[in-house]
Amino acid sequence: MKHIGWCLERIQMVMAHIPRAVISQEDKDKANRILDEIQEYANTLAQLILHPKFKRYLHQLETSSIEGIRLQAHEIEELSKNLEQMLYEVDLYVKDLRESIISNPEQWKKKADQLVLMIDQKFGGEKGELRKEFQIALHTEEELKQLVTSEEHLAEFLK
């Protein structure tokens, strides 16, 4: 989960630098770079949570003999459902924001703010403050090497 938290935190950090408007070509280029980064983090997130091993680890936690671990597993399972929904929503937002850069730049700020708000409400509070569930590591180093295709993200995970 700590790798999932890392991806969410990076999305929040990237979104903190969005341009307020996309009128100049420089603003449009910056906005597209930010959307590319968000999509890259979302792709890494999908690789982590949609892999069958993630579900298998959750099941192992849920069947633990320690009640506290079972309770935390239930919380993580609920988070994983929210994460899957969030991936779908991020994909829609990114597509919509790209379209707004081209054809409706005056809507950019409102739509970008909605994406930031959605992520903050579901997974944290203030930027950079994610829920405690994201401090658990579920994947081993070898599994991360098999799951994550972004070399940059993998290097961060293995630090």
Image: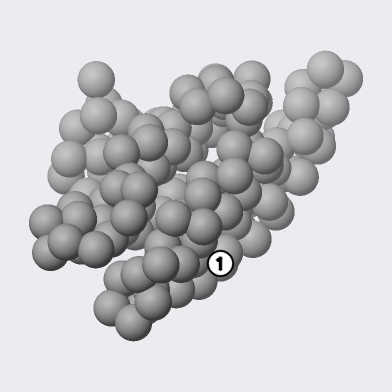
Measured as percent of width and height from the top left, residue 120 is found at 59, 37
Q: List the residue tagged with mark 1.
A: 88
Position of 135 compared to 147: left or right? right
Position of 23 compared to 77: left or right? left
Which quadrant holds the C terminus? top left
Q: Is residue 8 above or below residue 109?
A: above
**Residue at left 27%, top 52%?**
34
Q: Is residue 53 above or below residue 144?
A: below
Measured as percent of width and height from the top left, residue 123 is found at 62, 36
| 34 and 81: which is toward the camera | 34
Q: How is the image coloured?
A: one colour
**Residue at left 77%, top 34%?**
75
Q: Which image quadrant is residue 13 in?
A: top left
| 38 and 77: which is toward the camera | 38
Q: Secondary structure at mark 1?
A: helix
Q: Residue furthest bottom?
A: 103
| 120 and 147: which is toward the camera | 120
